[in-house]
Amino acid sequence: MTPIRVWAPEAQVVRCVVGADHHPMTAEDDGWWSWTPDGEEWSELDYLVTVDGSDPLPDPRSACLPYGVHGPSRTFDAGDFAWSDDRWRGPCDGRGTLGGVYYELHVGTFTQAGTLTGAIAHLDDLVDLGVDVVEVMPVAAFGGNHGWGYDGVQPFAVHHPYGGPRALQEFVDACHARGLGVCLDVVYNHVGPVGNYLSTFGPYFTERHSTPWGPALNLDGPGSGEVRRWVLDNALRWFRDFHVDALRLDAVHAFHDDSPLHLLAELSDATAALSAELGRPLDLVAESDLNDPVMVLPTAAGGRGMTAQWDDDVHHALHVALTGERRGYYADFAGGTQAWPDGTPLRVLAKTLTEVFLHDGRFSTFRGQVWGAPVDPHRVSGHRFLAYLQNHDQVGNRATGDRISETISPGQQAIGAALYLLSPYTPMVFMGEEWRASTPFQYFTSFEDRWLGDAVRKGRREEFAAHGWSADDIPDPQDPATRSASILDWAERGGRGHTAMLDFYRELIKVRRREPDARSGDLGATQVEVDDENGWLIMHRRSIHVVCNFRPRSQVVPLRGLQVERVLASWARAPVVDAHGIRLDGHDVAVLRTR
């Protein structure tokens, strides 16, 4: 059997606890300890570890935690799975995830079952929609049965209520069998509060840095080499042992690393080496608040080497243009602030659709300082930025978890969908968005410690009270009904008010796949024309043109000499195109191809 090894550099005595037996572990170099069980009876072993007489604790590299984050670790042989994806060469016919259509889902609310096995039942629906990559919100083990997953404490273990590690392998294999890539959301910027025993083992955290969620990982202090290896080994393990195609790295702006080689750059280089070894593309997608293209520049050019990053500025601009919201971080995206004194919502939207960021060296009112840096359209592909109308943060971090479809008309959602799905960016659909799901996606937890549950509830209510919300209107994160309300209702997908939107999303994605100009990531080949007075916008992508009427009344949008060959998609009735332009209904959009 493979030895059980733990890193405890300051320990004097480390023991492996199996049942009532305490087995001394042998000290090795660099602070490592090991114990090798004897005999075939240990093919599957439940065990705990004590460090200098501590309570028995799970292994920080637990592969399986069937009893939760406080219980014994269980050995797991990742190689003991019969994969059927030998011919898999990566998403998008081996090109990788860039430019493909992402679909973000949360395992616990994607289906009533709330498991990876349950999710497999709807993969064919995603194929039918035109999805290329399934992005799975975090599956690392966390305290309680239900939650978003961003408070994970055991990154090597797959949350057991989701089905555990074998279920994740089965899910990835099922995705690949259908031509779907898999992007796994991972969290390395902090560790959750429940079941966090890392400090007992070694210097995993540092007091030199902090994060909004608690102590920062020790990435640049004494002992940081093994902490970095803990992160790197975990990331590479998902690629190698679970065959995932990409990782989404949560909030990398909260990584505090003053080392000569930043952790992200080190991970990028290690991922590139593994990609060459495995013979398929492996991608890293960062969630970054920095608005700095250095994130996606190659490490050889001094960049962080990420394949792509999320682009919240596109979301914010779409949201403001469609809803009119202007509070908080939305203010600058309405124009008329220090960021852009003579800007308007449509002009801001035009900028983000062509230049990636609004805050690209401009003043950010919300942050109180100049923020970001410009993207060179001749050096960087738009595919390196993910664009979306909704995602888990932008829905779930609203007071009631309401989707944008609760605020805007179907036609307005169709406008937003057409703009981001046919943009030069890599588009991402949030689960249920495509059929205008009526279910919210609310913030929910299931902490077993009463004090922690009370603190989360209190903090959530106080946060939104500052924005005028009554405490009674804020869903209780600890109430099981909050999670239940967030489970997608797949039955409504074929009902009135939902099928038309689903069909429209399908058509838009078909246009993206079939039309090279719609699929292109060339930022320089994208221009946007706006008329603030009449409320229309046209996104030009060489031969493809997305014409949008933001006004609730019908109007003719001038096409200024464009020779229209065909209407590829439209939301409302078939639009009339003549010498004067194209007549659109109120809150309408049409996709045209020109000669």
Image (tube, rainbow, N blue to C red):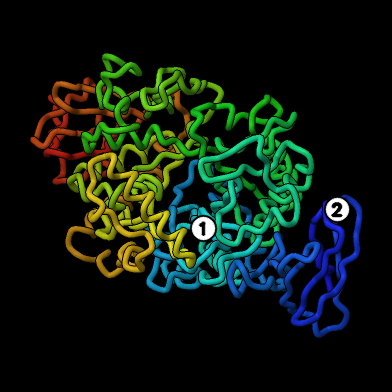
> Which mark sits nearer the N-terminus, 1 or 2?
2
Depth check: 329 or 498 in front?
A: 329
Depth check: 13 or 280 in front?
A: 13
Quadrant in the picture for the N terminus: bottom right
Give the residue number, with chain letter if any, for mark 2: 31
Say whether residue 247 is left or right of residue 439. Answer: right
Q: What's the mark number on residue 180? A: 1
At which x and y percent is residue 454? 40, 58
Amino acid type, mark 2: Gly
Residues marked 1 and 2 touching at CB (< 8 Å): no
- Label 1 environment density (alpha carbons within 10 Å; few <14, some 14–19, many ≥20): many
Q: Is residue 585 above or below residue 402?
A: above
Res 349 seen here? yes
Q: How many marks?
A: 2
At which x and y percent is residue 121? 44, 71
- Label 2 environment density (alpha carbons within 10 Å; few <14, some 14–19, many ≥20): some
At which x and y percent is residue 300? 71, 28
Amino acid type, mark 1: Leu
Depth check: 129 or 290 in front?
A: 290
* Quadrant hosting residue 583: top left
